[in-house]
Amino acid sequence: MEILSYLYQAVDLFKEELGENLSGIYVHGSLAMGCFHPDTSDIDLLIVVHDKLPAEVSHRLARRIVGYHDSLPNKRGIELSIVLKTYLRNFVYPTPFEFHFSEAHLERYRTDENYLCGGFEDADLAAHFAVVYHRGFILYGEPIREAFAPVDNRYYLDSIIRDIDDAPQNIKKSPVYYILNLCRILYYMQEGHVSSKKEGGEWGLQQLPEVYHGLLRQCLKEYSGAGDAEGYEPGELTDFAEYMMAEIQRTPN
């Protein structure tokens, strides 16, 4: 309920700043899929507008979003993208976006009043659109199935696979991120289910070889906020990444 009150604050913020240009606000990510944890999760929003944003509106938004981000009770705050309504039903891949904010950009927004992240294309938005369509919920605007067309399978897959292409090289740096993403990608490829990281890991416990179950349990425990980031065996991590990449490559799209 506490998070819900903060979501309503976000609705008020965007209604005030965007006025009639605001078309919709939708929640995706862990909060939409029932596995949000205040220590490890961010709040993921997709904001939809009718028309392109003038630079002065984006700058004003950036200042207000930084303040909103700082007020949130979860450690990672908020991640959001603002997109044009036309792309919801006339999908373009990679998808253009008007404005983006996340923890990775926070310091730039704080220290550079001229900084804006927007006017580019982002392949990640295919996954965000798909999660909204299949698992998301609405805060403001048209019902999801009226506003969005489903994202083509090939674009969704390309979007999520981009996140793990370097898994064998980088899994030791971010074990939880790579392990759970590898699981949810294979889950989708084998069963067609758009899942959360947590659901992907739980599926892995049911479907992957038993030799990896200890690793998956450790990873899920850490993801839930109850585990420790220490204690992963580097060789086991690399072996898991290589096994999963091979499975993903041999599974028909």
Image (cartoon, rainbow, N blue to C red):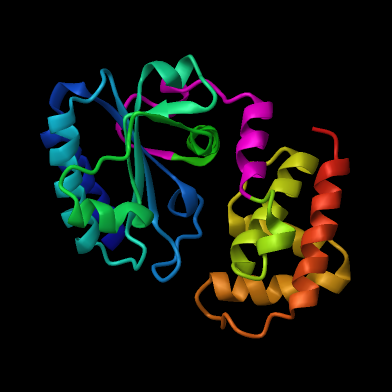
Residue 236 sits above or below residue 57 on the image: below
Residue 186 pos. (x, y %): 76, 48
Total marks placed: 0
Residue 205 pos. (x, y %): 77, 65
Front-most of 162 and 136? 162
Front-most of 36 and 70? 70
**Residue at (75% x, 70% y) in the render:** 237
Residue 42 sits above or below residue 229 on the image: above
Front-most of 140 and 1? 140
Any magenta on residue 157? yes
Res 5 seen here? no
Would you say 59 lies left or right of 152 here? left
Q: Tell me which corner region of the image, top left, top right, bottom left or bottom right, holds residue 20.
A: top left
Would you say 193 lies left or right of 83 here? right
**Residue at (32% x, 29% y) in the render:** 98
**Residue at (88% x, 65% y) in the render:** 209
Residue 80 pos. (x, y %): 35, 44
Quarter in which the N terminus is drawn:
bottom left
Any magenta on residue 108? no
Res 164 seen here? yes
Q: Tell me which corner region of the image, top left, top right, bottom left or bottom right, holds residue 50.
A: top left
Would you say 195 lies left or right of 121 here? right
Would you say 82 lies left or right of 180 here? left
Quarter in which the C terminus is drawn:
top right
The magenta stretch is 137-163
Front-most of 116 and 79? 116
Residue 203 sits above or below residue 188 on the image: below
**Residue at (74% x, 74% y) in the render:** 215
